[in-house]
Amino acid sequence: MPIFAYQARDDRGRTRNGTAEAADQAAAATALSQRGFVVVSIHETSAHAKRAASALGGRHVGKVPETDLVMFTRQLATMVDAGLPIVQSLTALVEQTSNRNFKPVLRQVTQTVETGEQLSTALGHFPSVYDRLYVNMVRAGEAGGALAEILDRLASFLEASAKLKRKVKSSMSYPIIVMCLAVVIVIFLLVKVIPVFAGIYKDFNAKLPLPTQALINVSDVLRSPAGIVVAFVLIALGIGARRWTKTERGRKRWDSWKLKIPVFGPLLQKVAVSRFARTFSQLIRSGVPILETLSIVASSSGNWLIESATLDAAKAIEKGESIGPSLAKHPIFPPMIIRMIAAGEATGKVDVMLEKIADFYDSEIDAMLSGLTSLIEPLLIALLGIVIGGIVLAMFMPIFKLHELVSQ
């Protein structure tokens, strides 16, 4: 019987890691839920997964682009809807897939389905490609006899998620590129240009203005062995900070701090809430059980505050509380969301309300990104001008007082 490694939270909110033996992933999650755990993540580590890795030559599954996954899902939905057998559909997709990481995965999925396994089980052997949300939606489609519809809905969901990521990345890429350019220019000035001026001013043997002397001192440090030490220290601090944000305590602090950043904090919160609402909507609409839905939504939210709030809400819902009131206890969710979810519960259309929430926040994100792009561009240009202009001005200050330096 397969063995699943899991991460879960107990009734006190503490993180628990361990393994569980069950027939499939859903059964393992159900067993953990009965023990009072709220599952954060779960994946197979048994012989089934080992056989899948062995079939791939024992190598690690490389990253599969979202565009390839979306295309696979959309094409599989079309083929299944047209009445083609699942094995024949998968075989055709294997033949036309060009991605060298994705092709062996699809080939193994096809072989597993040919042995009589369900598609969701075969996909579950590759959690790095097909996450819990994907596998559970496919499983719900198989159970409800609506696999084509679920796959089509899943493809639309993946497209919407990828589109949102692209918008945020493209909007943030410009300021990052400008800042990197500014750093490169400043380092070049400090290492190559300022030493030339320093040599000239040294011949005057006079006291230099404080800004000029400070820049010369910084330049001397960067060009000395101490500069290499400083560079290594900064790199080590960056790596250490990144690893710290991967810990539970670090992630909690980092995710909380991100939402407090002026301008960018509200944007990040809207992105997280939009992802929460759209994922929640798709899982409910697909027929995934509510507790499993909340567990998946929590693990895919991308923010510790939303994850923690969702897991706490799952405990309250398990005890019989409604979704709206259970989420209302956490300020991370805006009042509008709570009211719309409560209205959805009253009318039996929670999935529709959640989708409207996601669409609303997506439009808000578009507006914020457009405003930020138009605002950041002149600010960055001004910042670049101030930094580089300040360096140039500091180095030319002694020239403005050349007569004083010569007289000394």
Image (cartoon, rainbow, N blue to C red):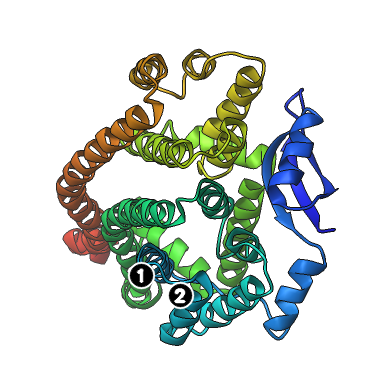
Which mark is first along the chain, 1 or 2?
Answer: 2
Residue nearer the viewer, 184 or 83: 83
The amino acid at mark 2 is Ser
Q: Are marks 2 and 1 in contact (CB under 8 Å)?
A: no
What residue is shown with label 1? 184
Q: What residue is shown at x 14% (from left), y 47% (from top)?
A: 374
What residue is shown with label 2? 89
The amino acid at mark 1 is Val
Q: Which quadrant of the rendered structure holds the C terminus?
A: bottom left
Residue 125, percent across and down?
67, 65
Q: Is residue 210 above or below residue 231?
A: above
* 10 lies left or right of 203: right
Residue 181 quadrant: bottom left
Q: What residue is shown at x 31% (from left), y 60% (from top)?
A: 173
Q: Which quadrant of the rendered structure holds the N terminus?
A: bottom right
Residue nearer the viewer, 11 or 342: 342
